[in-house]
Image (cartoon, coloured by chain):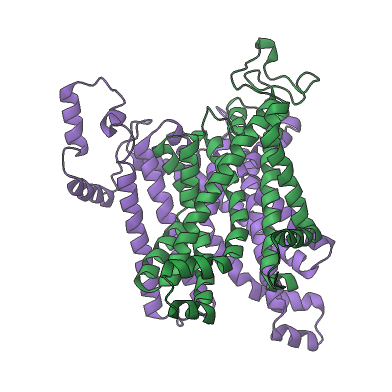
Chain colours: A green, B purple
Amino acid sequence: MPLDKPTLSLRFKRAFSVLYGNKIGFTGFLILCFFFFIALFGPWIKPYDIMDFGGAADILRPPSLEHLLGTDDMGRDILGGLIAGSRISLLVGVMATVLSMFLGAVIGLTAGYFGGFIDAVLMRLTDIFLVLPWLPLVLVLAAILGANLWNIILVIGLTSWAGTARVVRAQTLSIKERTYVERARSLGSSNLRVILRHILPNVFPVIFANTVLIAAVAILSETTLSFLGLGDSLNQSWGMMLHYAFECGAASIGAYWFLLPPGLCVVLVVLGFTFLGYALDEWINPQIRKR
Amino acid sequence: MLFVSSRYLGNKIAQALITIFIVLCVNFFLFRIMPGDPLSMLMRNPRASQQAIQKAKELYGLDQSLPAQFGRYLQDLVKLDFGVSFMFKKPVVEVIGGKIGPTLLLLGVSELIAIILGIYLGIVAASHRGRIVDVGAISLSLLLYSLPTFLLGMVLILVFSVYWGLFPSVGMVTAAAKFSSWWRQSLDLLAHLFLPAMTLALTLIGEYGMLMRSSLIEVLSEDFIVTARAKGLSEREVIHKHGYPNALLPVVTAISINLGLTIAGAIQVETVFSWPGIGRLMYDALNNRDYPLLQGIFLLVCICVIVANLLSDLLYMVLDPRVKS
């Protein structure tokens, strides 16, 4: 094994030791591990049925031994709702991020690599998406397409790629000029091969750091969208719980247990992604690391 | 304006106009690819008679070809005719016009609070760089950034209006109240304004603060600051006379670039506090599927944001003579 090509496990160890050395990043990593664990295994530990309404006596009960976090306005257990909701919130966050990252990477790589007219058109499109007010656009699109899980993912993915495309394009422009890319091209590699084999691996760290930050935005978007009444009522996310809390006036009647737990979950997950993104950015951009 | 090159200016204005035109197109086509028959949606009655449908088709111009419809749509826009709101049974322009005042009041007051406190926060953080005050300021900003605006609003209601009973949490005036004098009325308005404005301002403070911080840190590393220090000025004088005025520029332009984000905040704040402005109107339009109203609000907001972006570009050119081409 040549020295300059570390094995996968060694790379993993290195990445982990860098992450461990960065307190903010490691905190974010731990928070996210916790929530992904809950989303994966929580429903087995604490089963929950969205249609499991309690009796009239179970409506809006404060926390007790029977219901650790109390019940909502339809008599359902809030802890159970949180655990079930983590699946939906994280699913939307991850899927929308994947879509957004894919669009941003493809558009950025294409614009940067081919340049000229294609670049001009794609960058104008990117500018327009950057200028348009994000929330009104998302709301209008979601209202027109209809509120279900996949449409929400689609809408968030379609509206959040512009920043990534910009960064990827800038990085592509600088890598395109390097000699090994020139060499590959003069040896007759096709455009697609040059992009996939030589440019993408070098642009990937930038895409990755961006992705983590977009995941934070995606989860915030889903929460806001659901809160404003455009969520999927069959797949109850944390945002949907907050929507029901708002509709029944939980804040005005002092039902803090209906409001704070889903709110806290959203904040923690978004903070987790933000912390991790901050650390990755520092790791990938040596200039920031020095500061 | 002496420094502004007319070519750059023309370019920026042309770009803004193109973007507005694309928004017009999007606005036209989006609301025509809605699932379901637009007509039955317009009439909200699937069992309308054949004659009624024909009449409505002619009324809305749906019997014409798509390009003809687009031409008619543009004509109506020039005449400021956005159609009739389903909910209010009044022209959309009238409905929106009545809601602009409260939104401007809310946005203006929150921006003012956020700018003053945000710039102050940034200066404090930058001049104590790396120390506990700085770390505290960064953490606060990150937390405010991660907090959905509507959640912050609901928590403030819970604390300030339910537990402590200090401020009202609904609307702009006390319902059915009679005021003995104008200043009592203003006091009532201020009390209602406090929580929504605070919520919106808090979400902006973190952002402006961090911008001011990084901008000031960058300025403080420049040569003229070294000169100022060499002249024997105190650190306070260096920051206040030479650092802070030069660091303001990016923050000033960020405020107008940020309008899109501020509007997102306003939609949530107005919804939570039932503030009778454009944001609450959009929430009501969404939940009643009032498409003409939604279309009108979307257009208005987009144009405002595009114009604000253009203005911030121009402002930057005027304020910073280095940006010429």
Nearest the viewer among B183 and A92 is A92
Q: Specify the quadrant that holds the C terminus of chain B.
A: bottom left
Residue A160 vs A224, above or below: the answer is below
Q: Is residue A135 left or right of residue A85?
A: left
Q: Is residue A137 left or right of residue A208?
A: left
Nearest the viewer among A181 and A60 is A181
- Name the spot of residue A104 as percent of width and height, x first: 49, 58
Residue lying at 38% horizontally and 49% vertically, measured from the top left: B299
Query: In this orientation, does residue A122 appear?
Result: yes
Q: Is residue B323 left or right of residue B137?
A: left
Q: Is residue B194 left or right of residue B233?
A: left
Query: In this orientation, does residue B156 appear?
Result: no
Q: Specify the quadrant that holds the N terminus of chain B.
A: bottom left
User: Seen from this angle, which residue lies furthest right?
Assistant: B132
Residue lying at 46% horizontally and 60% vertically, measured from the top left: A106
Residue lying at 70% horizontally and 55% vertically, measured from the top left: A276
Residue A250 vs B188, above or below: the answer is above
Residue lying at 73% horizontally and 58% vertically, measured from the top left: A9
- Name the spot of residue A60 as percent of width and height, x first: 68, 20
- Name the spot of residue B125 as percent of width and height, x first: 76, 64
